[in-house]
Image (tube, rainbow, N blue to C red):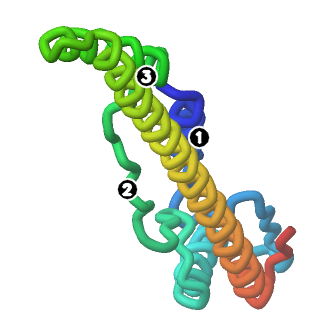
Amino acid sequence: MTRWRKRFLALLSATMLLPLPAPGAAQGLYVYPARGQSPQQEESDKGQCYGWAVQQTGFNPADPQVGGPPPPPSYSPQPQAPQGGMFRGAMGGAALGAVGGAIGGDAGKGAAIGAGVGGMFGMMRRRRYMEEEQQMQQQWQQQQGYMAQQQNALAQGRSSYDRAFTACMTARGYTVN
């Protein structure tokens, strides 16, 4: 598992563990009944202001959803780094070329051709591995950017909801901080 995949999984796990607010609650807000409202009246007003704030802002703190689902991560098997690259391919090609050349009458020439072809294939395999690694890194960065956008949208939605809830409760005679 590459370090990018480990980071992505750690970040994804961390965001899934964020606590959700209780339904109807204005998390982090303190409400004081400035006109001596009873606890029952306060709960009723909180419930009505909760509904009004959700309607006005489109943000429900009990079910904070923004945007669509995240882009699907590609869960392809982890590519293994080719060992040796060009040199390993050259040695294998040289051995194969020597056998082919020996059959044709010139083992040295066959080995040289095989080494060149094998080295080229080794380099191509190594480049393909590097491209796959870079692609996985880009996917991780895209996922990280998406999660940052989602967190920002949640914070903005929460802020709008809190302002609307506060306005409603203030209009009903409560002090809200």
Say whether residue 88 is visible. yes
Whole-percent x and y of residue 80?
41, 24
Q: Tell me, yes or no, whether the two marked residues, 3 and 2, touch with CB atoms within 8 Å.
A: no
Look at label 2 and name its amino acid.
Pro
Residue marked by disc 3:
82
Above/below status of 137 relative to 86? below
Secondary structure beneath label 1: helix
Residue visible at 80% across and 62% down in the picture: 30
Q: Nearer the viewer, residue 43 or 96?
A: 96
Determine which residue is flagged by label 1.
Answer: 11
Q: Is residue 143 left or right of residue 166?
A: left
Q: In terms of sequence position, does the residue under pointer 3 or pointer 1 come before the other?
A: 1
Front one among 164 and 137: 137
Q: Position of residue 4 (x, y in %)?
A: 57, 36
Which comes sooner in the sequence, label 3 or label 2? 2
Residue at 18%, 16% in the rendered image: 100
Circles 1 and 2: CB distance less than 8 Å? no
Mark toward the viewer: 3 or 2: 3
Residue at horizontal 60%, vertical 68%?
43
Q: Quadrant of the C terminus?
A: bottom right
Residue placed at 22% from the left, 15% from the top? Answer: 101
Q: CA distance from mark 3 to mark 2?
A: 27 Å
Callout 2 crowding tier (Cα within 10 Å): few <14, some 14–19, many ≥20 = few
